[in-house]
Image (spheres, rainbow, N blue to C red):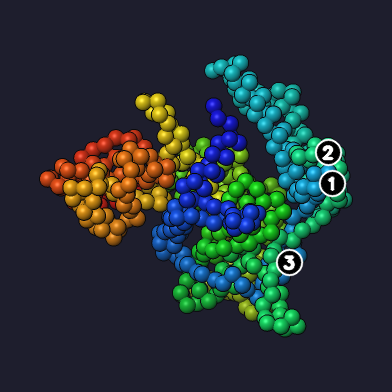
Amino acid sequence: MINQEDFFKKITSHAKEYGFVFQSSEVYEGLSAVYDYGQNGVELKNNIRSYWWKAMVQFHENIVGLDSAIFMHPTIWKASGHVDAFNDPMIDNKDSKKRYRADVLVEDYIAKIEDKITKEVEKAAKRFGDTFDESQFVSTNARIIEYTQQIEATKKRLYGIMEQNDLVAFKQLIEDLAIVCPLSGTRNWTDVRQFNLMFSTQMGSTAEGASELFLRPETAQGIFVNYLNVQKTGRMKIPFGIAQTGKAFRNEIVARQFIFRMREFEQMEMQYFVRPGEELKWFEYWKEARMKWHLSLGIPANKYRFHNHEKLAHYANAAADIEFQFPFGFKELEGIHSRTDFDLGAHQKFSGKKMQYFDPELNESYTPFVVETSIGLDRMFLAILSNAYTEEQLEDVSERVVLKLPAVLAPYKAAILPLMKKDGLPEKAREIMDELKLNFMCHYEEKDAIGKRYRRHDAIGTPICITVDHQTLEDQTVTIRDRDTMLQERVAIENLSSLIFKKIKG
Ligand code: GAP
């Protein structure tokens, strides 16, 4: 069985080989943690975005869209707390010269203990077979109890340190846990320092007149500062939502794991404005609704889990992540946060403008509370790609790589393939292509043997291949080949559109 590290390497090289993701500025040796999407990647990315937009905006009559600018008034970032507190604690290893996030080093330490617990449980499950009672085992096994206590104690110290922003205690924690640099293997650490993650730039033509701007680190603030514009012009009544997709920028200290953690990435965010006191009800609603969205793509439920935050940011009164099982373990894919009235209240204070909503049903004004759903588009792309990548041994002992993408997200919905480049087959295939491309992203291909063309489309996840042969000219039927089952059937050309549509609807 292939290990997860090798599996992840295969996905990244497949993404490059088949035009999904390229390293940015590759001809200049690349730019770290920045990526470009190729001809197939951009289609997959657009389809994920559109699937999200439909679910959030098209299917909710009380949610509308927005496209706010990346550049915003710098005071917005002061009000939101990003100037003062959007920091990560960093630490360097003096021997390897590698930089790490101090909290990630401690979290990795905790994850290793968690792995030990999982292994103990797996061993015991094998030993006891059907009679195994996991919860009893976990609560009574001395070694597991000790591990659990270690985890609790470490978390308590970590959260306390982060809350107090005590950088000296942070270094002490790393020393006490005897954490070594994964590269050099030494404990020769620098002090822990805070590092602000926002990128800044200048607006204005002269040095004196120029003002410092930030590239937005989240799209959400564009929604907050526009909320009354949208509410008034759209005559929205609470509860209502504003959705936005767009680029965000973070100068991540440790940017690794391909498109999982990038310095330029895209978010899909929705802020839901509710009556104060009703936010926790809506928080639960959105947790469930967002999980349903993920499962609607047909990805197995055991690849997802919730992680409820024990330590809440100062502006939140509830927060949860939807985690996905990436090849490198369960990691955050999406966040659902109950952000209270923190952001609107802060913008009211800093701008001096009223951010209140008049509720006609209650006949009173108040600052709405906000529940937010926030998902990284690139992370979702990676989740979809890693779930779809499949290597299959075929009956004739050859192998194929197939991307079992949900049809609705696949870059091409169908490939149109004339069996031969003669006898009028290309002309007939072109006719079909011209009809189908009005509604679906299709790909026409006549080069190479048909088997090779099938394999190429398996590798980019095209759900259906349509082959035009001599019989087509006689009876207006084609062969369609299913990507996943590889089964072929004969269908009438006039039924192709409804067939593809059915496939997309799932
Ligand atoms: N407005 C809330 C917010 O920005 P976040 O947890 O910092 O919350 C939301 O980010 C989502 O954005 C994450 O769940 C993740 O999917 C994505 N994300 C955050 N940082 C990222 C990065 N450096 N690269 C790729 N995606 C990232």
Residue 83: image tag: 3
Nearer to us of marks 2 and 3 is: 2
Location of residue 135 (image quadrant)? top right
How far is the residue under mark 1 from the one under mark 3?
29 Å
Q: Nearer the viewer, residue 501 or 290?
A: 501
Q: Residue at x 58, y 50 (%)?
A: 259
> What residue is disc 1 on?
94
Task: Please tell me whether mark 3 sits on a helix, a strand or a loop.
Answer: helix
Q: Residue at x 68, y 29 (%)?
A: 117
> What residue is disc 2 on?
186
Give coordinates of residue 300: x percent, y percent: 47, 38
Label 3 Cα crowd, 10 Å radius (few <14 / some 14-19 / many 20+): some
What amino acid type is highlighted by mark number 3? Val
Nearer to us of marks 1 and 3 is: 1
Q: Residue at x 36, y 26 (%)?
A: 396
Q: Answer with mark 2 or mark 3, whichever residue precedes in sequence.
A: 3
Task: Please tell me whether mark 2 sits on a helix, a strand or a loop.
Answer: loop
How far is the residue under mark 2 from the one under mark 3?
34 Å
Q: Answer with mark 1 or mark 3, whichever residue precedes in sequence.
A: 3
Q: Nearer the viewer, residue 246 or 359?
A: 246
Give coordinates of residue 223: x percent, y percent: 56, 68
Q: Nearer the viewer, residue 358 or 135?
A: 135
What amino acid type is highlighted by mark number 2? Thr
Quick check: can you spot residue 281?
A: no
Residue 472: image tag: none
